[in-house]
């Protein structure tokens, strides 16, 4: 099947789904939801495909005009110039369509669970973890996403040992998945009197937020412990037995939540985090056959991989996966303008996928 035939078929399929959705025929609720989703997903591709097919038709007509024996010289020159423009536009659209046709990660449209943990570097690593949490919060605000801190364990001096947040909005995971890995910072700590640069690190994990339909959790597979919250760290550390620890026995995955005064709310938040960790665990297992390939992928989510260095003395941010260096540390870390990094990462990921397809 030629490229044009494939696009014609996609346009026809989109039209057929539109007719089903708007027609008198009664659809089952699940079928309606599935068709609506497919219609929405095909929309951007079909829009570009229609433009592409029109340009192909215009190119054929322009070439036919040039080949006519009775055409005058001025008209021929105009037609030849049009052919050059049409060919250029067709190539550009073809590249755009190929990107749109790339297989989608079904988790891309999901919300995300963000986990940040201070690594090597003591108090400085905890302060850096706090910087990262604020950076992601500002990025979420910039994109109109909802950012909710689910759990936080602070050091009492402005740093965080670990934090978990929920980020909700349009295609959150599609962009945030590139943040999983080890983030390294190089700077002079405020407590360093000699002005010596220290290197610290924090680990970031971004999980697609799982819904009930994504992962089934059997109650008998859970051990739920209730205990008294203790601090520092909880937003509402109290003296009642409201803290919750949930252990998923088959995998050993453990989630602890104590920030809320209500035991019920703590359990609800803990289950939300557990569901996402289990969903991510299943995705990792499903992808294990491609483990060697995934190591070279930008969005592999390998949390042991050093992905980025933030060098404060030089105002430099380097993403090691794509060898990108930017002297925009204030814009990126303080203002949350992460698209300076995420857009090139997406482009690189798409280019790699195109070369493999």
Image (cartoon, rainbow, N blue to C red):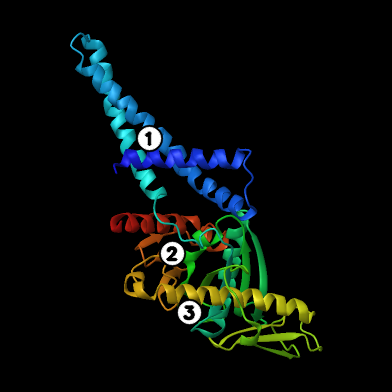
Image quadrant assignment for residue 136: bottom right
According to the picture, the residue beneath numbered tag 3 turns out to be 200
Image quadrant assignment for residue 327: bottom left
Asked whether, in this view, residue 242 is left or right of residue 141, the answer is right
Q: Earlier in the sequence, mark 3 or mark 1?
A: 1
Residue 32 percent location from the top left of the image: 60, 50
Tag on residue 275?
Answer: none
At 67% from the left edge and 78% from the top edge, which residue is drawn? 270
Q: Earlier in the sequence, mark 3 or mark 2?
A: 3
Residue 179 percent location from the top left of the image: 48, 67
Using the image, determine if residue 247 lies above or below residue 287: below
At 72% from the left edge and 81% from the top edge, which residue is drawn? 234
Mark 2–mark 1 Cα distance, whole angstroms, equals: 39 Å
Mark 3–mark 1 Cα distance, whole angstroms, equals: 51 Å
Callout 2: 10 Å neighbours few (<14), some, many (20+)? many
State the SS at label 3: strand
According to the picture, the residue beneath numbered tag 2 turns out to be 317
Q: Nearer the viewer, residue 236 or 18?
A: 18
Q: Nearer the viewer, residue 128 or 234?
A: 234
Asked whether, in this view, residue 253 is left or right of residue 180, the answer is right
* Disc 3 + disc 2, Cβ < 8 Å: no
Residue 275 percent location from the top left of the image: 60, 75
Callout 1: 10 Å neighbours few (<14), some, many (20+)? many
State the SS at label 1: helix
Residue 42 percent location from the top left of the image: 48, 46
Asked whether, in this view, residue 4 is left or right of residue 169, the answer is left
Asked whether, in this view, residue 5 is left or right of residue 340, the answer is left
Q: Nearer the viewer, residue 209 or 124?
A: 209
Which quarter of the rendered picture does the C terminus lie within? bottom left
According to the picture, the residue beneath numbered tag 1 turns out to be 52
Mark 3–mark 2 Cα distance, whole angstroms, equals: 14 Å
- Looking at the rendered structure, the number of numbered marks drawn on it comes to 3
């Amino acid at each position: 099947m030629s490229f044009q035939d494939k696009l014609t078929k996609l346009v026809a399929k989109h039209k057929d789904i539109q007719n089903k959705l708007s027609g008198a025929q009664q659809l089952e609720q699940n079928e309606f939801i599935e068709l609506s989703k497919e219609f929405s997903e095909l929309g951007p591709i079909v829009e570009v495909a229609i433009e592409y097919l029109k340009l192909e038709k215009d190119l054929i007509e322009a070439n036919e005009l040039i080949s006519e024996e009775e055409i005058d010289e001025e008209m021929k020159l105009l037609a030849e110039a049009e052919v050059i423009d049409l060919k250029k536009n067709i190539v550009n659209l073809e590249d755009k369509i190929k990107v749109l046709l790339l297989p989608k990660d079904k988790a891309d449209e999901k919300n995300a669970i963000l986990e940040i943990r201070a690594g090597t570097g003591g108090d400085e690593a905890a302060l850096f973890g706090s910087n990262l949490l604020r950076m992601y919060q500002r990025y979420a605000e910039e994109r109109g996403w909802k950012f909710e801190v689910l759990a936080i364990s602070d050091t009492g001096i402005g740093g965080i040992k670990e934090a978990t947040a929920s980020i909700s909005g349009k295609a959150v995971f599609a962009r945030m998945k590139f943040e999983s890995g080890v983030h390294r910072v190089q700077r002079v700590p405020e407590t360093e009197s000699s002005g010596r640069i220290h290197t610290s690190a924090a680990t970031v994990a971004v999980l697609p937020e799982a819904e009930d339909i994504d992962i089934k959790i059997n109650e008998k597979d859970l051990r739920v412990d209730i205990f008294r919250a203790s601090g520092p760290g909880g937003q509402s550390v109290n003296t009642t037995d409201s803290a919750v620890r949930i252990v998923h026995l088959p995998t050993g995955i453990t989630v602890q939540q104590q920030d809320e005064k209500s035991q019920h709310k703590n359990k609800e938040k803990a289950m939300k985090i557990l569901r996402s960790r289990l969903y991510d665990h299943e995705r990792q297992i499903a992808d294990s056959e491609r483990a060697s390939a995934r190591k070279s992928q930008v969005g592999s989510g390998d949390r042991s991989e050093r992905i980025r260095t933030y060098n404060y003395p030089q105002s430099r941010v380097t993403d090691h996966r794509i060898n990108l260096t930017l002297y925009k540390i204030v814009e990126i870390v303080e203002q949350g303008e992460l698209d300076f990094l995420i857009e090139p990462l997406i482009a690189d990921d798409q280019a790699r996928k195109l070369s493999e397809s």
